Amino acid sequence: MKPAAADPATPAAPSRRTTAVVRGLMLLVLWLLLMPSLKPADLGVGLVAVAAGTFASLRLLPPEAGHLRLGALFGFLPHFLWQSVLAGVDVARRALSPRMPLKPGFIVYKVGFRPGLARNEFSSITSLLPGSVPVAESEHDITYHCLDLDAPVAEQLAAEERRLRSALVAGERHHD
């Protein structure tokens, strides 16, 4: 079956060969940095390990287009750290205050990131929002468990998605 036509603004996924070469070279460089010697036996074992690692990485994490904008990601870092502190304080406050009103439940958030690395990053980062944690996902939605359904969780998620959209550029998966 032929995949649907991609949005022209969405970058296409790199080929499996290109991805394999890049990952293989990165693993080889890592092997060479970690090895105390360059003896032929060590290099032979290294090449086998690189081949196995490359094969495993392609099976576990198929090629996907997209990229990070490092400047935007570094700009996001102070916000991320602050949200992490707030989440920790919120959890401590709720744990130590017996009268803290809770209204636990689930919300379903329609996420703009397609399934893949960008959505996984979004899900990981939003797990640090105070009082909410992602628990399930579908093609277009992520379900969050919230400690207080009266809190503006959906608005916070939308704000995080807007911030991350400038740093995470999702692409299209490679189709075999």
Image (cartoon, rainbow, N blue to C red):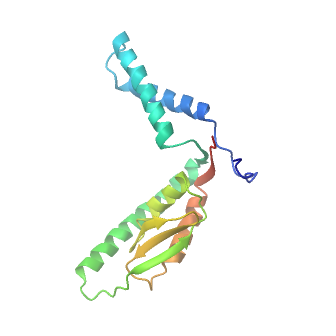
- Image coordinates of residue 47 in percent, x first then y, are 43, 20
Q: Residue furthest top?
A: 40
Q: Quadrant of residue 145?
A: bottom left
Picture residue at 63% right of the left edge, 36% below the top:
15
Q: Quadrant of residue 147?
A: bottom left
Q: Nearer the viewer, residue 62 or 158?
A: 62
- Image coordinates of residue 111 in percent, x first then y, are 57, 66
Q: Nearer the viewer, residue 122 or 176?
A: 176
In the rendered view, would you say 8 is above or below 88? above
- Image coordinates of residue 121 in percent, x first then y, are 49, 56
Q: Quadrant of residue 124?
A: bottom left
- Image coordinates of residue 144 in percent, x first then y, are 45, 72
- Quadrant (top left, top right, bottom left, bottom right) of the C terminus: top right
Q: Is residue 86 left or right of residue 123?
A: left
Q: Is residue 44 left or right of residue 154?
A: left
Picture residue at 61% right of the left edge, 57% below the top:
166
Q: Residue furthest front?
A: 1
In the rendered view, would you say 45 is above or below 158? above
Residue 39 seen anywhere in this rendered image of the structure: no
Picture residue at 41% right of the left edge, 22% below the top:
48
Q: Is residue 82 left or right of residue 96?
A: right
Q: Nearer the viewer, residue 71 or 109?
A: 109
